Amino acid sequence: MKSSTTFENLPPWLEFFTFPSVNVLHVLLGCIILGVSAGLLGSFAFLRKRSLLGDALSHAALPGVCMAFMLTGTKNPVVILCGAVFSCWAGALAIEWIVKYTRCKEDSALGMVLSVFFGLGILLLTHIQKSGQAAQSGLDKFLFGQAASLVERDLYILGGLGLVLCLIVILAFKEFKIVSFDPDFAQAVGLPVRLVEFSLATLIVLAVCIGLQAVGVVLMAAMLVTPAAAARFWTNNLSRMLWLATLFGGLSGAIGAYVSYLSVKMPTGPWMVVAVTSIFIGSFLFAPQRGALARARRHRLFRQKTAKENILRTTYKFAEQAGRWDTPVSLNELLQHREMSTAQLRRTIHRLTRAGFIEETHVGLLHLTEAGKEEAERVTRLHRLWELYLMTKLEIAPDHVHDDAEEIEHILTPDLERRLLLELEGELTDPHGQKIPGSLAVVAEEKRRK
Amino acid sequence: MMATPAEEIPIEVHDLTVAYQHRPVLWDIDLCFPQGQLIGIVGPNGAGKSTLIKAIMGLVPLASGHVEIFGQRSRQALRSVAYVPQRESVDWDFPTTALDVVLMGRYGQLPLFGRPRAKDKEIARQSLEKVGMGDYADRQISQLSGGQQQRVFLARALAQQTRVYLMDEPFAGVDAATEKAIVTILRELQAEGSTVIVVHHDLHSVPDYFDHVLLLNLRTVAFGPVATTFTEENLNATYGGRLHLLSDVTERLRQGEWSARKQAK
């Protein structure tokens, strides 16, 4: 009978998903909640450009954690949390005082507080470890985090607090939003800005402190900032950005818990950071509008459009000079007039042929189609209109307008074209004495429409 | 000696002094802004024009003096004034739409934890329409031009539905069409009886735009109707000569780090 043994003897990486013990579930839930609250509160730090402050504060929590242990001899999560929060606040106050009463600016204040508090924390940690107390063996986990050390008690307290933080953000969303965007205006409409800023700072401190056990003091900053930075690539809407940041944070937390299950000795913090950074890199590359690949694609399409329009224009110019719009032009002639490689020219010709603008009669000889003639006229019109505009309205010398028009002709929209035509109505012969093709017809059409 | 009762004076400034790092920026300003007028504030760079606006709105600490809004000194009274800050005061990369920004003008009317209601959204949309930005409601603010951003700020102030407007350089860096549009709206506001106070940067347009003018340079040089106040003599006093003695005294104050004035009571 095989059925009853299907769930035994699974490899660990699969076994995780069957939740072999309740503790696995605790660790997983705890890490998800920590990731969610860090991502959520971290978004506000990110938007208010206070990300470095989050880093300084998480490092500043270490001496508080150690002192809480030294004073009480226990690792009760409430006690440790209080010590961490107290230490964080001391760090925040120290930063404010340094900026206010010395000539140091915020960046040096942050650097000083971060290193001094962290150094003090390491001192205390070493002292504790040397003193050989039995319960102390867990404290060094606070450096890089150890999710496996989360037990049921931790889940209720830290996880519960994390949920409360998220709830407060949902409730006070509009207050946090306006104070982050325009604190002066917020004060002008009567909101208690200092109270809101204080609350936000407190929530960020709490989000940092509840995450310390799983992520660690050194890397907590990444869990605050990176989810928000990744989310920013995907949307311009604040609510959606926050949802995404919490999703990314929670996902990274889950991955950290997973790794912690597979290898108990492995510190969780670095793995959560690797997870969230991978999400960031993925966002940087693949986000639809702002992602690197999307942008590269837009650039490539624009370059292709430019090349196509340039070839059409040059072909049209030859045709104009010869008097017939379907005059055949050779590839060599095109290559002489346009700076491109033969391979680029061939590709462009291929695209133009596919679009129906060009026909290749013999090898190396091509001419415009009817559709190609109209398209070429359109681009030529834009080029010459822009030259005319520069000459008449900006009073730029005639021999200086060509290069400018070479670039601008590719970005003028039909709407801009209409406006140009109406503005230049009186002068529809371009600076080099050529008529602007199709212009009079378009102007007449516009007038008829009005 | 007041002819008008205090409750009808939109903004009254008593003996206001503001110092920045022990250096006075505004010295002994004493003003009574009349209701229902279009008032311009002009002066050279560093004259304290923006600081005066911010001091009225309670955004900078006062070294001495106080401000009354319709006779009141409370923070609640500030809600009767719509403040339009400089465009640079905000990060326009913030992920939010034009409508969202205008909706923030309604937040003063909402309770803690309260969400904007349908009525607030309607008012916000109408305010955007009034400034000609109705089609841009869902546009991201980072995609707006300077003139459009200024209109969004103005719409936000309109959404507050008050009778007093304080604007800090609304025409700076704005295209001609937007400038005309804004002036038209300001005139409409004034015709409805609102008081509009504008920090302005361009002297030439003062007689065209404003009924009253305040000439400011650290202290009040002159204040009154444009016809009688905007004179060459007053302009020379504002932009011309330096108050050498006052400069030297304030420099001593700054170096010695003594308080500029006794604290306001």
Image (cartoon, grey):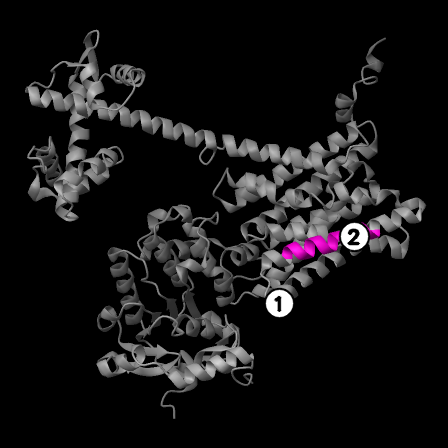
Say which amino acid is labelled 2: Gly
Which sits in the foreground, A189 or A207?
A: A207
Task: Judge whether B85 appears above or below A436 on screen.
Answer: below
Residue under pointer 2: A121
Residue A279 vertical position relative to residue B6 in the rendered view, above or below: above
Choose between A320 and A230: the one closer to the eye: A320
Does A55 lie within the magenta span?
no
Disc 2 secondary structure class: helix
Name the kind of residue labelled 1 in the image. Thr
Question: Can see residue B104?
Answer: yes
Q: Which chain is home to disc 1?
A: A
Q: Secondary structure at mark 1?
A: loop
Q: What's the distance in space between the residues labelled 2 and 1, CA to CA?
A: 25 Å
Q: Residue furthest top?
A: A362
Asked if badges 2 and 1 are on one and the same chain, I answer yes
Q: Position of residue A104 (x, y in %)?
A: 60, 63
Prevalent SS, magenta region = helix
Q: Which residue is mark 1?
A: A102
Residue at 22%, 70% (x, y): give it: B208
Q: Residues within 10 Å of mark 2 (few under 14, many from 20)?
A: many
Q: Residues within 10 Å of mark 1 (few under 14, many from 20)?
A: few
- Examine the rendered structure and indicate whether residue A88 appears above or below residue A333: below
